[in-house]
Amino acid sequence: MRIEKVEAIPVSYPEPNDFNALRHLCLVKITTDEGAVGWGESITQFTEANFATKAIVEGMAEEALGKDPVNNDAIWRSLKDRAWWYGYEGGIASYAISAIDMALWDLKGQALGVSVCELLGGPVHERLPAIASSHAHHASIPKMAEEAAGWLSTGLQGMKVGFGKRGDAHLGYDHDRDVAYVKAMRETIGDDKMLMIDLGIKIQWDVATAVRRVQAFDEYGIDWIEEPLGAWDPEGYATLRAKTKTLIAYGEKEWTLQGFERVLATGTCDVVGVDPGRAEGITGFKKVTDRVEAYRRQANAHAWSSAICSAASLAITFSSSACKLFEFKPLENPMQHELVDVPFAHQDGWVYPPVDRPGLGISVRDEVVDRYRSERVLSQ
Ligand SMILES: [Mg+2]
């Protein structure tokens, strides 16, 4: 089997879980001489990053054309080597590597007739709890509690909520409101459900604010606080960790194993967030989970984007003892629910190993890709 064609396809779509904000992804479709098709994705988020990634994928395609996708690790290394100048320590090159790598794993699994999860060594969990990951949509705390109860009514075993997001929720800005919110959520969902808080880029807590807020949240047993001091603040995180009980999660803005290794070495990160559409694909993510296991910490897939990225995240999640749960978006979105023939879903709050179909186990609908294909370089 030889790689015949590498296509980079920028798409844009409204995300109902984020107030229908326009989201941008660069998909990669790789076709072989035998007609097999593999799909990958990079979570580029912004239109300029999307088209920059397209250009890099098209250049990097030279490293893949004519090669056998079964030798995906050798191709991944050649992509890394190619980006020696413009991709050192990550950036747009890592998006391109991510999407190409995912598509290669998909093809490799199809060629060998096994799932990506099995290629990674097979599932180490029988099943994992599924949680809702979303943004709160209301100004009133009782209404947000009602909304959360709705998410969990499907059997989901917990919820992670973004602070500092669009809309009227206004979470993350005021101590008393935040504590009242957490108290109300805990009372609504009960003590046996997971509750995580994820600080968005708009929230800029200083260390003292983070300590005071998390100490107050400690009383309500939240399961982790995500990025309370952003992507990188080793001293701040050390202080926060010494003064609070809640697990600290960050890492999702890292690109490479070296970046994640730096985070782990601080000893301040309990839950390492990783997105395979950013952290150099399934190959990159797997290298990170191996290190997270060695540090005896938790890894968590950031899978906000398309079903392609969810398929990759799920395969890795089930192959690693460092991963303990899987996140689902409570509202349906086009890149999850229209893009593939069988959208990912939990069953009564559980998710099961993705081993029933070869490769990533998804069948991507070309007509849906075409519907959301983005032709503009800049949007107004
Ligand atoms: Mg996050």
Image (cartoon, helix red, strand yellow):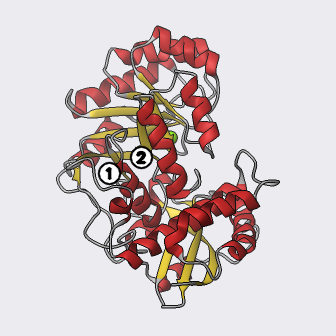
Name the residue located 59 percent from the left edge and 68 percent from the top edge. 100
The quadrant of the rendering that contains the C terminus is bottom right
**Is residue 181 toward the left or the right of residue 60 in the image?**
left
Which residue carries the number 2 mark?
134
Q: Nearer the viewer, mark 2 or mark 1?
A: 1
Q: Return the residue found at the far bottom.
A: 34
**Secondary structure category for the residue under label 1:** helix
Callout 1 crowding tier (Cα within 10 Å): few <14, some 14–19, many ≥20: many
Residue 344 horizontal/vertical position (percent): 32, 63
Residue 23 seen anywhere in this rendered image of the structure: no
Q: Amino acid at mark 2?
A: Ser
> Along the line of sight, which residue is nearer the eye, 109 or 54?
109
Q: Earlier in the sequence, mark 2 or mark 1?
A: 2
Q: Amino acid at mark 1?
A: Phe
Q: Is mark 1 within 8 Å of ligand 1?
A: no
Distance between the Cα atoms at labels 2 and 1?
Answer: 22 Å
When the figure is inspected, residue 185 is found, relative to residue 235, above or below; the finding is below
Residue 285 horizontal/vertical position (percent): 50, 49
Residue 329 horizontal/vertical position (percent): 38, 53
Q: Return the residue found at the far top.
A: 243
Residue 81: quarter of image = bottom right
**Is residue 47 toward the left or the right of residue 174 in the image?**
right
Q: Which mark is residue 318?
A: 1
Q: Return the residue found at the far right.
A: 85
> Along the line of sight, which residue is nearer the eye, 200 or 340?
340
Q: Which mark is residue 75?
A: none
Tell me if label 2 and label 1 are in contact, CB under 8 Å. no
